[in-house]
Amino acid sequence: FKEELNGAEKLRVVSQLAASVSHEVRNPLTVTKGFLQLLRNENIEYEKQKEYLALSLQELDRAEQTITNYLNFAKPSEKYNVEKLCLKKEIEYLVEVITPYALMQGVEIVISTLKDGRFVFGDKHRLRQCLISIAKNGIEAMPNGGELTICTRKGIEENVISIKDNGVGMSQEDLERLGTPLKTKEVGTGIGTMVAYSIIKEMGGKVKVESKRGIGTEFSLVFPNEK
Ligand code: ADP
């Protein structure tokens, strides 16, 4: 049942991100089309031709990268496989996948202090699913734009990933209900955080949430320190 729930939740996130990915791919295509139209003019200087071609290729590379990142996340994950995961690499991946969605919602992603040499043990695809789900909620909490700040911290015995927004925030009551299925329609299904919590628990970690209405929310994923 848990497998099915994870799969269903991932499919939901995948389809919710699709619109922003299409949007992010359309921009470079429009730009490239513009350059190709300019290049149809035979009187254009050689230097300009070269410049337009270079810019077009750059834009197409960007579109291709956006699609590749998305498809990597969307593809069904192979079987459960625990390995040593580099937090810096995982956060870089998170930022790549979530950026189109953030741009579409007018949210800036700020990454601070990503240091090498911080690791956790777990299944890569599951951790990615969990990070994307929490970041996505953070973005959705800022309907008028804002900043999503992502960082890692290291304590003596723990490694922390922090995902913080300056969005609508949650009441004490909302906070207590997080990670359980929600009954009221207007606050969502609660399944995203439920799945995320179970993934972190499976990895031996904990989720801490601090939130204030009108100020914002910080999700801290706390993992035992791995060398
Ligand atoms: P859903 O996908 O249905 O929104 P989630 O479990 O992902 O379910 O989230 C449940 C609810 O918790 C959200 O609908 C939202 O009300 C609240 N929530 C989660 N993260 C945040 C956040 N960063 N800021 C404000 N509210 C949040």
Image (cartoon, helix red, strand yellow):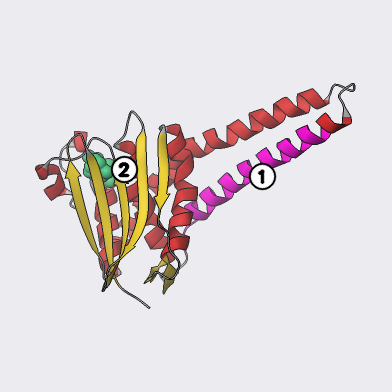
Image location of residue 202, percent across then percent down: 28, 68
Query: Is residue 181 something that shows in the picture?
Result: no
Residue 13 lies, with reference to residue 40, above or below; the image says: below
Q: What residue lies at 43% left-to-right and 63% top-to-bottom?
A: 115
Image location of residue 179, percent across then percent down: 20, 53
Q: Give the SS element for disc 2.
A: helix
- The CB of the residue at mark 2 lies under 8 Å from ligand 1: yes
Q: What residue lies at 48% left-to-right and 36% top-to-bottom?
A: 20
To which quarter of the image does residue 49 belong? Answer: top right
To which quarter of the image does residue 102 belong? Answer: top left
Q: Which mark is residue 61?
A: 1
Considering the image in quadrants, where does the C terminus appear? bottom left
Is-magenta flag for residue 43? no
Residue on which the image places disc 2:
138
Image location of residue 128, percent across then percent down: 41, 58
For this view, does 193 lie left or right of residue 33? left
